[in-house]
Amino acid sequence: MAFDNSEVRFEIKDSLGTLSETSRGWKKQLNFVSWSGNDAKYDIREWSPDNQKMGKGVTLTKDELLKLKEILNGVEL
């Protein structure tokens, strides 16, 4: 799904999972997103129910995501 909200162009290539959802329907998700026509990257941020608005988030390359996974595997919860 591709959008152009006149500030930022983005296309959610794949929705990988939802981490949480607010009472207003905003979802914190891990997605594979292309920003402004660039190569897609892994992205964690909150999205509105229609996926046209988003909050601040973190965009990660595959190598960064693998490193995060390695770090999280070592965290004792």
Image (cartoon, helix red, strand yellow):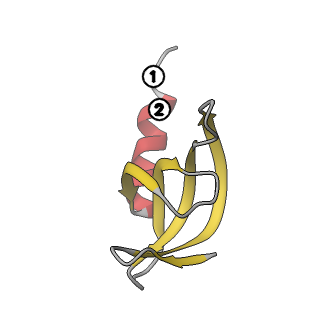
- Seen from the viewer's position, the closer of residues 30 and 46 is 46
Find the distance from the CA under tag 2 to the CA under tag 1: 5 Å
Q: Position of residue 4 (x, y in %)?
A: 46, 79
Q: Would you call the spot at circle 2 few (<14 residues within 10 Å), some (14-19), or many (20 or more)?
A: few
- Seen from the viewer's position, the closer of residues 61 and 3 is 3
Residue that badge 1 annotates: 75
Residue at 33%, 74% in the rendered image: 7
Amino acid type, residue under disc 2 in the picture: Leu
Looking at the image, is 20 positioned above or below residue 76? below
**For the residues bearing labels 2 and 1, Cβ distance under 8 angstroms:** yes
Q: Would you call the spot at circle 1 few (<14 residues within 10 Å), some (14-19), or many (20 or more)?
A: few
Residue at 66%, 48% in the rendered image: 17
Residue at 58%, 60% in the rendered image: 51
Looking at the image, is 54 positioned above or below residue 18? below
- Seen from the viewer's position, the closer of residues 31 and 27 is 27
Amino acid type, residue under disc 1 in the picture: Val
Q: Position of residue 12 (x, y in %)?
A: 57, 69
Q: Is residue 32 left or right of residue 75?
A: right
The dot on residue 72 is 2
